[in-house]
């Protein structure tokens, strides 16, 4: 066994990038769970639909990529609210089984319909963070300033090839055809930074909406006690629809951000991610928004550092790379067994 | 004849197969305080829940002459009925300020903050705890918050479900004094459900006693207070 400390940072950064996507999808799960104590198994497929909307607007219609992403998020919000209105609200909110079955059915239907329309093949998408923005200082300048542990190499943008871990030299950079920072001997590319920054901005917006707007206050009130919320005049149905809309926004954002790393969109693209996100949400406590974010990131780190680095690289157990998903299931199992309220969830104690 | 805030006739309510209210009828005159007394399980809480359409009901419920028995809970609140449920009905995961803000959810005017300031004057303890989560307040403070939250929607009729439950006697007295003050100063109509008959009868103008979902007795509060049957059953005389 040989500790490969030099490549650890690379695995950690990769894990953190994936973790950001898991966090976004975990947030989508928690936004719905908080208000309804329901797991929406169609979260991933609704997000996939959002990614396809981005694909259609950007690749097929030629719309500016960021506008396509924002528009896809907004349309997804409408789809989420419509699903809540049509398929969830007619059922008794205290009886979870029918609605969980409906979300499972929705998962299958959306996947099959998407497969029928777009086939189960990868459709390449454009990279949102591929190139230096025009206002950034040129790479040469940055290199002189940093000189040493932090340097930056600028190369022309092009199709993305996953840079191999640890190989932080200009050659890899050229090969990858992408720009990245080298920190601690690891490639932190613009996609990683961009994913974090985008998620951070979206989270700030979410907490503004929940903390400062009347609709956000109503959502928190319904999550705290639906009956009390009705007694102050809140239309709980409409508020839950709002929660589904917010959840769809974050699911779509996660799917749009992860699509380039998956080399494109595809009807099955979100299925594994949903499992990791579920593990993240369970770890965070299912009803805590902050917990979902931290849980998602931790799951990304576990996947990158524990599984890919420790088990596969250090221990040399190559079979663990196919056990990644099982690790997520194990995590869900362990959390539910030993700490059902997760790290940050509310422990329900009721007076009877 | 005095204007009726609330007029209930032949009210039935059921949970599944169990009929809890069996043809209840009562009236709440405008600007008055009416109390409904009854033992555990008599149907007191259900009566208030039925008024807000929170259980399956039949019969007529007239709020200022308009039938609200088919209206949705949220719409009944919009018509000026505030309900402080048993167990207080605050939002434990929300701060005191947010609890008061959500109380004003149905309002569109700009005086919400002024109202919050007003209730802080009446309940100074709430102002001290404005940024704390409601779930971390003591029982008395939570009850004050629940009342202040209900008043934030500027109701014309306030429904109070056993506000004295679980509170220390001194705090109950203090709370009831504030209710009387509210009624005298603002003319707020109140319908109160209580087991604590002594204080409730002192405060109320008119009282009903329910047993097994039916009105067993009713009359002006001071008259009922001297009724031997009531004294025996509820006043421990």
Image: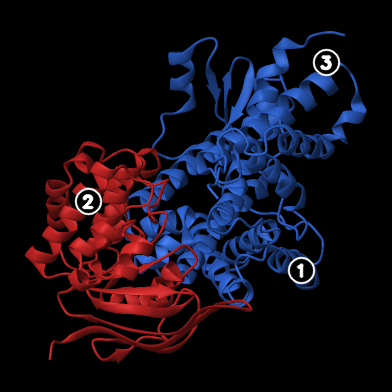
Chain colours: A blue, B red
Question: Image height check: is B126 above or below B216?
Answer: above
Residue B198 position, x and y percent, is 26, 58
Chain that bears disc 3: A
Name the one closer to the observer, B146 or A331.
B146
Camera-near label (1 vs 3) is: 1
Q: CA distance from mark 2 to mark 1?
A: 53 Å
Q: Nearer the viewer, mark 2 or mark 1?
A: 2
Q: Would you say the residues marked 2 and 1 are in contact, meaning their CB atoms lie under 8 Å apart?
A: no
Q: Which residue is mark 3?
A: A314
Choose the circle earlier in sequence order: 1 or 3.
1
Kind of element beneath mark 3:
helix
Image position, residue A245 (x, y; %) = 51, 63
Please state which of the two labelled residues, at mark 2 or mark 3, is closer to the viewer.
2
Any mark on residue B175, and which?
Answer: 2
Subunit that carries the residue with mark 2? B
Residue A205 x %, y %: 40, 49
Q: Nearer the viewer, residue B187 or B166?
A: B166
Q: Is residue A221 left or right of residue A41?
A: left
Decide if residue B102 is on the left or right side of residue A124.
Answer: left
User: At 45% from the left edge and 28% from the top edge, which residue is drawn?
Assistant: A138
Mark 3 closeness class: few <14, some 14–19, many ≥20 residues within 10 Å: some
Nearest to the observer: residue A199 or residue A287: A287
Disc 1 packing (10 Å; few <14; some 14–19; many ≥20): some
Up the image or down, B127 lies above or below A1; here it is below
Residue found at the very far left of the displayed protein? B185
Taking the image as shown, residue B76 lies to the left or right of residue A312, namely left
């Amino acid at each position: 066994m040989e500790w490969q400390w030099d490549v650890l940072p690379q695995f950690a950064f990769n894990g953190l990038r994936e973790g950001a996507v898991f966090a976004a999808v975990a947030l989508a799960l928690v936004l719905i769970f908080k208000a309804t104590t329901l797991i929406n198994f169609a979260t991933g497929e609704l997000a996939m639909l959002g990614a396809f909307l981005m694909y259609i607007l950007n690749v097929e219609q030629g719309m500016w990529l960021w506008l396509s992403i924002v528009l896809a998020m907004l349309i997804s919000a409408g789809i989420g609210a419509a699903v809540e209105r049509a398929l969830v609200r007619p059922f008794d909110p205290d009886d979870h089984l029918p609605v969980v079955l409906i979300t499972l059915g929705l998962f299958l239907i959306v996947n099959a319909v998407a497969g029928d329309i777009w086939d189960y093949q990868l459709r390449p998408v454009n990279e949102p963070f591929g190139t230096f923005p025009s206002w950034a200082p040129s790479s040469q300048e940055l290199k002189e300033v940093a000189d040493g542990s932090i340097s930056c190499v600028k190369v022309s943008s092009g199709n993305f090839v996953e840079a191999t871990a640890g190989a932080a030299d200009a050659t890899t950079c050229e090969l990858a055809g992408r720009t990245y920072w080298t920190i601690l001997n690891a490639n932190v590319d613009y996609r990683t930074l961009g994913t974090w920054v985008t998620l951070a901005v979206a989270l700030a917006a979410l907490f503004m909406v929940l903390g400062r707007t009347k609709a956000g206050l109503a959502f928190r009130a319904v999550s705290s006690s639906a009956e009390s919320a009705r007694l102050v005049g809140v239309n709980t149905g409409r508020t839950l629809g709002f929660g589904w809309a917010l959840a769809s926004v974050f699911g779509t954002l996660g799917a749009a951000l992860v699509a380039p790393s998956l080399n494109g969109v595809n009807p099955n693209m979100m299925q594994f991610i949903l499992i990791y996100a579920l593990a993240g949400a369970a770890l965070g406590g299912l009803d805590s928004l902050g917990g979902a974010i931290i849980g998602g990131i931790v799951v990304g780190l576990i996947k990158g550092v524990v599984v890919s680095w420790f088990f596969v690289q250090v221990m040399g157990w190559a079979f663990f790379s196919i056990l990644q998903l099982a690790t997520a299931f194990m995590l869900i199992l362990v959390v539910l067994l030993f700490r059902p309220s997760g790290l940050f969830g509310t422990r329900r104690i009721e007076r009877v | 004849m005095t204007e009726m805030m609330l007029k209930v006739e032949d009210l039935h309510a059921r949970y599944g197969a169990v009929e809890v209210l069996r043809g209840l009828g009562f009236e709440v005159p405008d600007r008055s305080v009416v109390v409904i007394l009854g033992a555990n399980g008599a149907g007191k809480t259900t009566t208030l829940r039925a008024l807000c359409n929170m259980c399956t009901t039949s019969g007529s419920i007239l709020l200022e002459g308009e039938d609200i028995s088919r209206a949705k809970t949220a719409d009944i609140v919009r018509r000026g009925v505030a309900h402080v449920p048993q167990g207080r009905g605050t939002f434990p995961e929300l701060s005191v300020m947010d609890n008061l803000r959500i109380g004003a959810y149905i309002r569109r005017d700009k005086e919400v903050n002024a109202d919050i300031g007003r209730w802080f004057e009446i309940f100074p303890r709430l102002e001290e705890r404005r940024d704390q989560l409601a779930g971390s307040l003591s029982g008395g403070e939570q009850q004050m918050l629940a009342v202040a939250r209900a008043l934030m929607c500027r109701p014309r009729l306030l429904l109070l479900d056993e506000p004295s439950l679980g509170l220390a006697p001194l705090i109950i007295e203090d709370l009831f004094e504030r209710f009387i003050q509210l009624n005298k100063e603002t003319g707020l109509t109140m319908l109160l459900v209580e087991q604590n008959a002594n204080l409730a009868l002192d405060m109320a103008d008119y009282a009903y006693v329910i047993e097994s979902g039916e009105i067993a007795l009713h009359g002006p509060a001071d008259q009922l207070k001297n009724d031997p049957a009531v004294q025996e059953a509820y006043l421990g005389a």
